[in-house]
Amino acid sequence: MAFVADQQGYPGPLHVLELKDRLRLSRDQEAKAQALLAAMFAESRPKSARLLNAEARLRQLFAGSRPDEAAVRTAVSEVETARADVRLVHLLFHVKMARRAHG
């Protein structure tokens, strides 16, 4: 979800914690990264559930009778809106992690 941030040197809290020994994080830095990770999961959990539900509705649309164009457009729009919301959470937490590291 946040590959673009990772590629440009903006690791998220999970990546920072995975590399905590190599980064030589202090206990305070590790605690702050843990707090950001928990906040990211708390914020993304309901949005991820919405994405999974939207994907399920899209699958059901095609598993049932023949879907019409309007129904497909609506279902895809719901999936992509939910996906964008999840991605945005992840990207913003990469930015927050960078601010914590430099601020």
Image (cartoon, grey):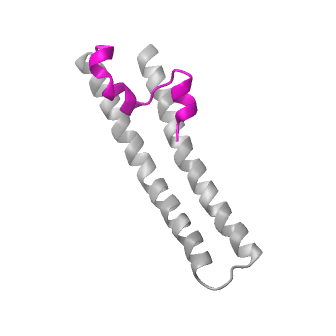
The residue lying at 69 percent from left, 79 percent from top is 67
Whether residue 47 is situated above or below residue 31 in the rendered picture: below
Q: Is residue 100 left or right of residue 86?
A: left
Is 28 covered by the magenta stretch? no
Whether residue 40 is situated above or below residue 45 in the rendered picture: above
The residue lying at 51 percent from left, 28 percent from top is 6
The residue lying at 69 percent from left, 68 percent from top is 74
Q: Residue furthest left?
A: 27
Residue 72: name its quadrant.
Answer: bottom right
* Count of number-bearing discs: 0
101 or 18, which is in the foreground?
18
Magenta-drawn segment: 1-24
Query: Can I make out residue 103 in this image?
Result: no
The residue lying at 67 percent from left, 61 percent from top is 77
Q: Is residue 44 left or right of residue 17?
A: right
Is 11 covered by the magenta stretch? yes
In percent of width and height, residue 53 lies at: 50, 66
| Quadrant of the snapshot with the C terminus | top left
In percent of width and height, residue 27 lies at: 23, 19
Magenta segment main secondary structure: helix
Query: Can I make out residue 101 in this image?
Result: yes
In percent of width and height, residue 70 lies at: 75, 74
